[in-house]
Image (cartoon, rainbow, N blue to C red):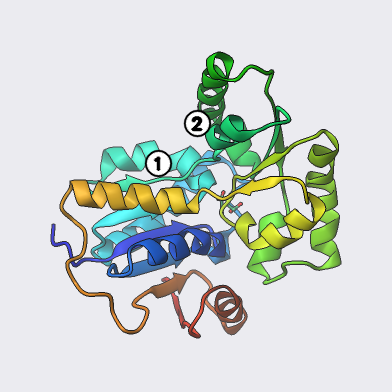
Amino acid sequence: MPSDLPIGILDSGFGGLSVARAVRARLPAERIVFAADCAYAPYGDRDEAYILERLGRIISFLVAQRVKALVFACNTATAVGVRRFRALLPMPIIGIEPAVFPAVRHTRSGTIGVLATSRTIASEKYARVKERALDWAQVSRPMPIHVIDQPCPGLMECVERGDFGSPEVERLLALYVDPMVRAGADEIVLGCTHYPFLAPAIARRAPGAHLIDPAPAVAEQLERRLAFLDLLSREAPAAADPTVFYATGANPAREAVLRSLWPGRPELLELA
Ligand code: DGL
């Protein structure tokens, strides 16, 4: 596979841009095709069949763009579909999962909070991620560790609207973040790729807590996989950002949201 092909990054919406920006920062010579399934989002409150069907369509689109690797910049999509699509496709597929392990490692209070979609929190994959982290903690941390799982319906929709701090955002964060703060959480895992865009609002409600965004670790893992497969781009970094953005239901309002999240007035193309 030629190393100058692009990397495909997908999400149900614009949350995946939090991962794309980490990839852009770490791998400036790579071309990126970003695909957001805005018209069919959110995924987080839907059943597995729906999510798999949508992923099939978005991935077919990216495969037709001849991507050399795929990044599931969506915890929900990773929890539901990464195993299946790894078995079906020849290219490397990098997923993302709630960063429970670093939270468990660094907590001083022994209480950590996980903000994620309902589907992620209900998934077997998340149960395994948590179990592995807690097993490690049992032998390595001299304290009981308590994980508060918090599904956050409605929160990704705020980011999709370009709303990062309205009274509605505050109302939802009061429901989702305040109880974990009251319970003493000092590590808060941003377990959905939309939530890093709400980090300032979350931090205001949880001033003593450390927020964990796994996007840089995903970019690092992508780099390792591409290097191992000798697929890192050999081109010099382009003068202009070579990222291309597609969305289902592309329209001027969605393009405006994209522009509030990504520098350089990017265009949003329709993903048909
Ligand atoms: N950004 C996605 C995630 O990381 C999900 C948002 C959604 O579609 O509910 O889980």
Q: Quadrant of the C terminus?
A: bottom left
Label 1 element class: helix
| Relative to 18, residue 140 above or below | above
Residue 253 placed where, x, y %?
Answer: 62, 80
Q: Are marks 2 and 1 in contact (CB under 8 Å)?
A: yes
**Which labelled disc corresponds to residue 131?**
none
The residue at which mark 1 appears reads as 82
Q: Quadrant of residue 170?
A: bottom right
For the N terminus, the quadrant is bottom left
Closest to the observer, 43 or 201 = 201
Indicate whether 14 appears above or below 268: above
Q: Residue 191, how many percent across, how many down?
A: 59, 45
The residue under the point 53% across, 28% down is 124
Q: Residue 155, position in %: x, y?
A: 71, 55
Residue kind at label 1, given as amino acid type? Val
Query: Could you tell which of marks 2 and 1 lies nearer the N-terminus?
Result: 1
Q: Residue at x 59, y 76 (%)?
A: 254
**Relative vertical location of residue 214 with respect to residue 138 in this rendering, above or below:** below
